[in-house]
Image (tube, rainbow, N blue to C red):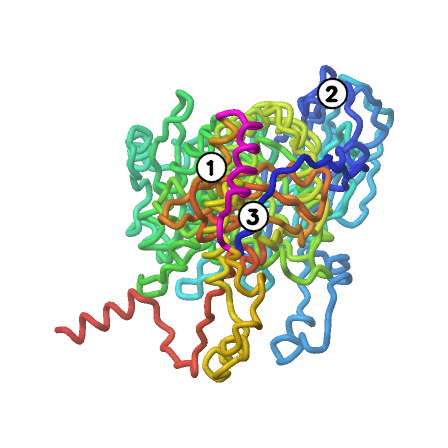
Amino acid sequence: MKKVLILALLAPSFLFGQQNKFAQLGEELPTPNEYRNAAGAPGHNYYQQKADYDIEVILDDKNQKITGEETITYTNNSPDNLEYLWIQLDQNVRALDSDSKLITIEKMEDFRSIQDISKKLFEFDGGFKIEEVTTPSGRDMKFSINKTMLRIDLDKPLSAGSSVSFRIKWCYNINDRMKIGGRSGFEYFEENDNYLYTIAQWFPRMCVYNDVEGWQNKQFLGRGEFTLPFGDYEVAITVPSDHIVGSTGELQNESSVLTSEQRSRFKEAAKSDTPVLIVTQAEAEAAEKEKKTGEKTWIFKATNVRDFAFASSRKFMWDAQGVQVGGKNIMAMSYYPKEGNPLWERYSTKLVAHTIKTYSKFTVDYPYPVAISVHSKWIGMEYPMICFNGGRPEADGTYSERTKYGMWGVIIHEVGHNFFPMIINSDERQWTWMDEGLNTFVQYLTEQEWEREYPSRRGPAYLIADYMRGDQNFISPIMTNSESIWQFGNNAYGKPATALNILRETVMGRELFDYSFKIYCERWKFKHPSPADFFRTMEDASAVDLDWFWRAWFFTTDFVDISLDEVNWYELNTMNPDVEMAFKKEKDGKADKFIGDTRNLTMVKDPLNEIDDNIDDFYGKRDVYKVDALHLQDYEKFKKGLTEKELALLNSGKQFYELKFTNKGGIPMPLIIRFTFEDNTTEVFRIPAEIWRRSEFKVSKVFMFDKEVSAIRLDPFLETADTDLNNNSWPEEKAPTRYDLFKKKQKNENPMQRDKRVKELGN
């Protein structure tokens, strides 16, 4: 209902006291120091350690076993003397006495079949067997193993600026990923008795020592991934002679392991902007049938990387193309068995090339010489220059749209991990969101530049609403240790990616966000950033105080639910008796009438005052809407006290709308309000989140227009992750929900298979 607004001077009312969400992040963040400054950049005494590896490894294809020997040279660039060194033994997560098995929560309802019980009884000894830890000259070194960690006790502390070298010899059994899962392992193809190996976490690796945590000392329990120092690698990989190997780094001995024709194709691929087959499907199929005897050793070198992985199989096809990034020619490559076609030959390498170009635009130029995508069923995992990706068509070569988009998404995501955390090297064991969340955000940007209206699973704000409105007992703050997170995918991937998207689209704007995000990436490439470094850099480079945003989105499990509670409509009282009396008469005429009064007009035939003229007195005969001379005289006096501008404003017909909002979910967000007017035009207002700074739960705002409003919508572009859209409209809008009376059973076939059947019927 429209109300009349009479102008008055009101004394302002202030709510004193600091509000929770808008308190500055002080105690929550570490104190800036000489290693990490208050701007979020590396400090003037920032340091990081270096670990160089010389490795020889043998892949035993008969027994599915890895045997290796490595020499690690560790350089202490810290100001501290180190009494011991810590090394990660991640394969020990598969040891028979692994804690990861003991701490798994189980219920009897998990054991509904013989197969479920068999899985529990299944034992696989996949842990490292450490055979030797010695000096380069062969003298034994004292060491101790604590589950997934190995400590080397030095004869004397490693002083600042010094290096130490040591040698480790080990072996382990490779796990069958199809039976027991894992980021690394093998897939067995029974048809031709062949294996496809994706090998990672395969060698003892140095832990990170830095100014934030000292030694990284968190055990590997299976979920929290890896934090590693940078270094240079030379790796000799011995495999069956007919295997094709894809690996971190650049191949050093192509003349020994590739045919002249393959080398010629590789040179052609380097100059091509479309994929060129180096090993064809026919050649791969011949290799998997013939199975040559003997071995070959492939030698790779990689500079300034934090890890090393490889893939090996005689089933591999291999294609490549050149990609120009930052004035350098990068080799985008894919390795895949025939089971990956037709999807992989058509898309994989093009996706690799697109990903490194798009990520380079938003982060830093891709620095490495190669970027590789390897196909293996069900897996998605990343390492420097190489990643393992799922997305397998049906045996008949058809595939569903879900399979295609799943393949596209996982390749973009895993290749994108080259940037987070392989280059911008965050601590994954502690903060999964710093690599998965940031990577998922840039994945979304990359997907949208791959295909118009790409149906991204994560990134758009509205897609996280279901998760955020869920049971708070099973939701963790983003700032939770990786091993303790509820709903891992939503927490570490979806929510942080959404938060960054909201910053980019709604809070900061694209230009300001993109600049600040790129500054963060440039500052911390080939370094070890912490959450505080990210938070501070984004504020430092943008001049936007985002403490409220980090606090709400990253440190709590609050959600977004802002309701439009009340809309009050006002119009200025002109004080002109002719105008106001006419307005009152029209308003009264349109007012709802009491049903008794309405019925009495016809059913009460002869009220006494209509028969007896002496009943109605002055009040009964008075016209309450009549404008008299006194009204006009008072109005003339009133006008003399106004300026021309004030009188014009009074007669302008301005419409005032007072909107009242409640923050029900706890996260303060900008108010994006769309007004639709009677003439069907619209106007959008964007009010910064700071409107909540002194009143955390309830705010109001007055809007003034020249025309009447017909509808109001809060968050009309679905950009704040509001979890309840039913309280966002005036007048209230609620869409009906469709329900099915029954469900039809459908044949389990993808649309491509159905299309084949349709064509067959047509013929």
Q: Which mark is residue 4?
A: 3
Q: Is residue 56 left or right of residue 583?
A: right
Whole-angstrom CA distance, mark 1 to mark 3, is 13 Å
Instruction: Tell me the number on the disc at residue 509.
Output: none
For label 2, the residue is: 77
Q: Residues within 10 Å of mark 3 (few under 14, many from 20)?
A: few
Residue 624 on image: x %, y %: 53, 56
Classify mark 1: helix, strand or loop.
loop
Which is more N-terminal, label 1 or label 2? 2
The residue located at (55%, 42%) in the rendering is 630
Q: Is residue 439 visible?
A: no
**Quick one: 342 or 295, which is closer to the camera?**
342
For mark 2, give the secondary structure: loop
Q: Position of residue 158 (x, y in %)?
A: 81, 23
**Dot 1 crowding, Cα within 10 Å, few <14, some 14–19, many 20+:** some
* Circle 3 SS class: strand
Over which residues does the magenta segment extend?
625-644
- Circles 3 and 2: CB distance less than 8 Å? no
Q: Is residue 332 magenta?
A: no
Q: Is residue 636 magenta?
A: yes
Q: Residue drawn at (82%, 20%), measured in percent from left and top?
A: 159
Amino acid on which disc 1 is placed:
Asn
Q: Mark number for residue 651?
A: 1
| Residue 284 image offset from top left, x and y in percent | 34, 51
